[in-house]
Image: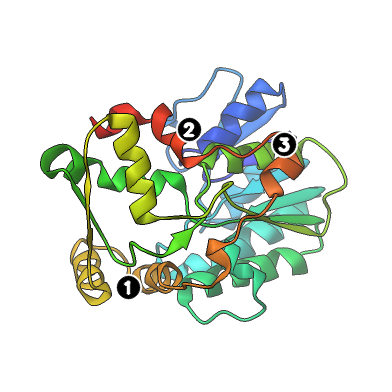
Amino acid sequence: MILVTGATGPVGSQVVTQLVEAKADVRALTRDPKAARFAPQVEVVQGDLGSPESLRKALDGVERLFALMPTFGKPEGRTYDQNLARAASDAGVRQIVRLSVLAAEAAQADDPHTAYHLNGEREVRECGVPWTFLRPGQFMTNALSWAESIKSEGFVREPYAHIKQAPIDPADIAACAVSVLTSDGHDGQAYPLSGPEALSIEEQVARVAEVLGSEIRVINVPPDVARAEWLDQGYPEMMVDGILKHMGDENGIHGKVFPGVEQLTGRPAVTFREWASSNVDAFR
């Protein structure tokens, strides 16, 4: 049995779906099972990462665990990894695959976003269960936040729009997770994951414009203006500051291309243009 936390999100739901396709026994953890929409083969269980007792019940009979944690949330969010790792150890789980972030390749964190995930990795390492970390960078699905302004105004507003990153399709992250969860030889490994090409936001928008067959302008917003707007929209300060730091890291790890997707799945990673073509209706 494989338990998936964060099972209703964009990566977790893909992991569940792809595990079903691989004919694995899947259990999905959610706070609200009645609202979950999964294939009938999926066992849906109620659980809360802040409740160790609910996690012990959810982990009963589980051999492998895909741990996808909320990046930020309640103040006690930093204890979620500890709760889950300890419950997994007590339940006799044989493998934890934790979704982390690309910046966790560094030993030290200089932003809250990376520090959160490094803390989570440490909790998993110290619990005694064999572990594997998947460390993706920017998600291609972040581009969906442009949909409304593209449809209504024909432009995209972003800071650092000229800086290249190598965004990855969340479906590819899920495919990597499924590969690790259904095969051996990954204990103690940390896999950096990226898409197949480094693209600036300007270049990503151009790909969307190509598949739409229309022109889209890019407005390069000053970082302090973007920060104020995102905070005003209700995003947590530590998340905003972490994202801005990584977006502005012109020569950093987020602009590098890694072979992890092909290494783990045996096929090339999805390109941004392929992703945009598959999701073109969202921008119309």
Q: Residues within 10 Å of mark 3 (few under 14, many from 20)?
A: some
Of tags 3 and 2, which is closer to the observer? 2
Amino acid at pointer 2:
Glu
Q: Is residue 182 left or right of residue 74?
A: right
Residue tagged by mark 2? 274
Tell me how far mark 1 sits from mark 3, CA to CA: 36 Å
- Residue at image coords 22%, 44%: 216
Q: Nearer the viewer, residue 204 or 254?
A: 204
Percent from the top left, x then y, of residue 18? 62, 28
Residue pointed to by mark 3: 265
How many angstroms separate mark 3 from mark 2 (CA)? 17 Å
> What's the amino acid at mark 3?
Thr
Label 1 amino acid?
Glu
The mark lying in front, picked from 1 and 3, is 3
Q: Which residue is mark 1?
A: 237
Rendered position, 23 above or below 112: above
Lower position in the chain sequence, tag 1 or tag 3? 1
Give the side of residue 138 with respect to residue 117, left or right: left
Which quadrant: the N terminus? top right
Quick one: SS at disc 1?
helix
Residue 61 visible in image:
no
Tell me whether the residue at label 1 lies in contact with that at label 2, contact meaning CB atoms closer than 8 angstroms. Answer: no
Q: Is residue 13 visible?
A: yes
In the image, residue 77 sits, relative to residue 134, either above or below, namely below
Tags 3 and 2 touching, CB below 8 Å = no
How packed mark 2 is, by other alpha carbons closer than 10 Å (few <14, some 14-19, many 20 or more), is: some
